[in-house]
DNA sequence: GCCAACGTTGGC
DNA sequence: GCCAACGTTGGC
């Protein structure tokens, strides 16, 4: 069971919109990066991930779950990239900011702290537990 | 708004 | 297939 982190600018797609999409969820499209694509292809239904607001907020705000595995992204006319479907599971009790993550020594190897530009990132089981706890869950 | 980091593109 | 130029992302 792997854990993930999905980055989104709130002005493009926010946690509130993800929640409004309800249990049937939405497709997570628009990924145009091969490393992120590889992660999407690895995902299995039921795996959970953090929802992170970049730029504005800069914090992990909620937890999402994969409800449909990798399939082609019809917004990609080259046909090279795909997407998964996600649904909102639960908000964090309080947002965990990038600042707090960087200040936590146990999270120094977290991808977010080192390569913040990658839009879909793997999260280790240890990191998952720490960030959840910091978020009051 | 700036700029560093990174990915992609295209000329050779 | 290399690498310079360019565009984008996202933290600050």
Image (cartoon, coloured by chain):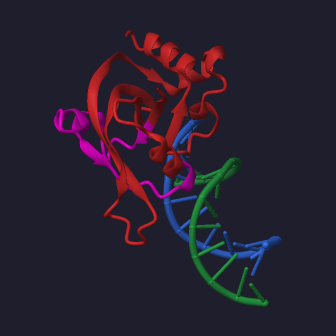
Chain colours: A red, B green, C blue
**Would residue A80 be visible to someone looking at this image?**
yes
At a point 46% along the width and 65% down the height, the residue shown is A80
Choose top left, top right, bottom left or bottom right for residue A88: top left
Whether residue C5 sits left or right of residue A58 in the image: it is right
Where does residue A119 sit, x and y in percent of width and height?
49, 45
Where does residue C5 sit, x and y in percent of width and height?
69, 76
Which segment did they paint magenta?
Answer: A6-35
- Relative to residue A87, is residue A36 depicted above or below? below
Nearest to the observer: residue A132 or residue A57: A132
At a point 37% along the width and 10% down the height, the residue shown is A137
Q: Is residue A29 magenta?
A: yes
At a point 42% along the width and 27% down the height, the residue shown is A60
**Would residue A100 be visible to someone looking at this image?**
no
Nearest to the observer: residue A117 or residue A103: A117
Whether residue B6 sits left or right of residue A81 in the image: it is right
Whether residue A71 sits left or right of residue A114 in the image: it is left
In this rendering, the count of numbered labels is 0
Nearest to the observer: residue C3 or residue A83: A83
Q: Is residue A96 magenta?
A: no
């Amino acid at each position: 069971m792997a854990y993930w982190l999905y980055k989104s600018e709130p002005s493009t797609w926010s946690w509130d919109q993800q929640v409004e999409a309800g249990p049937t969820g939405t497709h997570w499209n628009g990924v145009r990066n091969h490393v992120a694509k590889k992660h999407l292809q690895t995902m299995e239904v039921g795996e959970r991930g953090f929802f992170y607001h970049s730029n504005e907020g800069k914090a992990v705000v909620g937890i999402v779950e994969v409800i449909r595995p990798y399939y082609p992204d019809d917004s990609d006319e080259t046909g090279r990239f795909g997407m998964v479907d996600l649904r909102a599971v639960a908000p964090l009790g309080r947002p965990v900011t990038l600042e707090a993550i960087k200040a936590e020594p146990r999270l120094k190897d977290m991808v977010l702290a080192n390569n913040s530009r990658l839009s879909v990132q793997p999260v280790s089981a240890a990191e998952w537990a720490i960030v959840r706890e910091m978020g009051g869950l």
